[in-house]
Image (cartoon, helix red, strand yellow):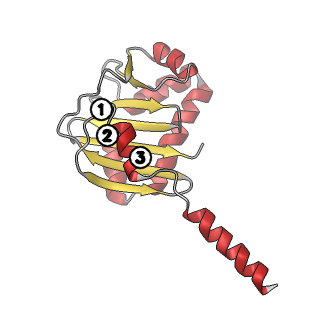
Amino acid sequence: MLRSAIALISTVFVISGCALDKEEDLRLQLSQWVTLGETYFFQSSSTCTAAVFHTESPRISSLLTAARSVDTGLKMLEQGQPLVFKVGNKSPNALVESIMSRDLPQGISMLNSGLAGVNCMSELVKSIYHQAIMNPTSRMAFIPDGHGIMIVDAQAKAVIYVRSNG
């Protein structure tokens, strides 16, 4: 009986210790699209990931396809394509609201990724993230494989990444 209890407790600790992402792997993925500098913050658990990287160049590579309208972005998302939204002066927050008004399930999926990532953030990172998603000059990318959201905030010279486990 004692062995069973110890095995169960050990299993719970191993499962809870699994992280969704490794910093090196995430840096490799994101560096396809943006120039990453120093890591300011990285936290990944079994349910969420949040990361903040410095960038001197907030330019997003043309390797990440740009959607210039919400409707175009939704079509690209249906095809499972990673994309960056370049829709006028809409903040990432306003974009998600627009997406939800056109395609509620897709909008909820994006909202879930963005909100669940907050569970992996420190209070300071939550503040940085909030400012970035409310900034109309920030760019939001959605990476369907893994339900990741990347926010590039040129004013803060930061690349912020969040995701949930589903």
Tell me whether the residue at label 2 lies in contact with that at label 1, contact meaning CB atoms closer than 8 angstroms: yes
Local packing at callout 1 (Cα closer than 10 Å; few below 14, some 14-19, many 20+) is: many
Q: Nearer the viewer, mark 2 or mark 3?
A: 3
Indicate the amino acid at tag 2.
Answer: Ala
Local packing at callout 3 (Cα closer than 10 Å; few below 14, some 14-19, many 20+) is: few
Q: Nearer the viewer, mark 3 or mark 1?
A: 3
In the picture of the structure, the residue carrying the numbered disc 2 is 132
The extreme left residue here reads: 56
Q: Relative to residue 154, is residue 100 depicted above or below?
A: above
Whole-percent x, y for residue 2 in the image: 77, 86
The extreme bottom residue here reads: 2
Determine the residue positioned at 53% across, 22% down.
77
Indicate the amino acid at tag 3.
Answer: Asp
In the picture of the structure, the residue carrying the numbered disc 1 is 138
Q: Which dot marks residue 25?
A: 3
Q: Relative to residue 109, is residue 64 depicted above or below?
A: above
Give the mark nearer the N terminus: 3 vs 1. Answer: 3
The quadrant in which the N terminus is found is bottom right
Determine the residue positioned at 36% across, 38% down.
30
Indicate the amino acid at tag 1.
Answer: Ser
Q: Is residue 38 left or right of residue 14?
A: left
The quadrant in which the C terminus is found is top right
Whole-percent x, y for residue 48 in the image: 51, 51
